[in-house]
Amino acid sequence: MSNKNIEIEFKNMVNREEFSSLIDFLNIRSEDFSEQENHYFDTPDFLLKAKGSALRIREKNGSFELTLKQPHPKGLLETNENLTESEAAEMIRTGKIPAELIIRSIKELGIETDKLQYFGTLATKRAEKEYMKGLAVLDHSRYLNKEDFELEYEVDNRNEGELTFLNLLKQLNIPVRKTENKIKRFYNEKYRQQKD
């Protein structure tokens, strides 16, 4: 079963102290955090990344979802496909995609899917909380011997959502920081390590 949806979200990197103040402000308890792992794929020469796209398997509570993210005029176009545990394990091992719709979408980008390979895993502790008319998401991520903290805000209305998001940062004296999405941060670190 696959689906496509447009994602409108705002994100901001935060430090450990700001992360703690967000937890307090949003009234999040430690048991509100759940663990998830994102397994990332690309070609050896980063062709998906070059097209502004990303491919990952998200593993959460024993379920596996394959997601292709592509640029879209209104945000990001996400194509999602549920996988079995054995399909996910096989894809991590071989890079072969078991989902027709996602294979088609990648080929439409002009990328041959037989070049895809597993690049690594990013583990995230995530808590979600309804806030105003959107969903505030706090993420503490670990990958490639690095860790970072992030606030995301998912909304239906871009303009209203952006105001609420900026206002939340202002209330907690958190500076607006240019924030790449997780896969870009993961790849930038991977690329940096390959060069060292």
Image (spheres, rainbow, N blue to C red):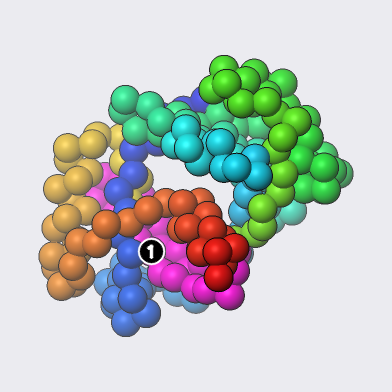
The residue located at (72%, 35%) in the rendering is: 115
Question: Outermost residue, bottom direction?
Answer: 17
Element class at badge 1: strand
Q: Main secondary structure of the magenta part?
A: strand
Q: Is residue 49 visible?
A: yes
Residue 1 is drawn in which quadrant?
top right
Q: Along the line of sight, which residue is nearer the eye, 28 or 157?
A: 157
The x and y percentages for residue 188 are: 48, 58
The residue located at (68%, 26%) in the rendering is: 112
When the figure is inspected, residue 148 is found, relative to residue 69, above or below; the finding is below
The residue located at (83%, 48%) in the rendering is: 93
Q: Is residue 130 visible?
A: no
The x and y percentages for residue 83 are: 75, 37
**Drawn side of residue 123 relative to residue 50, left or right:** right
**Drawn side of residue 98 relative to residue 12, left or right:** right
Q: Which residues are magenta?
A: 123-152
When the figure is inspected, residue 27 is found, relative to residue 12, above or below; the finding is below
The x and y percentages for residue 11 are: 32, 54
**Drawn side of residue 97 relative to residue 19, left or right:** right
Total of numbered circles in the picture? 1
Magenta highlight on residue 29 = no
**Drawn side of residue 10 relative to residue 174, left or right:** right
The x and y percentages for residue 59 are: 68, 52
User: Quick one: label 1, few (<14), some, or many (20+) residues within 10 Å?
Assistant: many
Residue beneath disc 1: 150
Quadrant containing the C terminus is: bottom right
When the figure is inspected, residue 93 is found, relative to residue 191, above or below; the finding is above
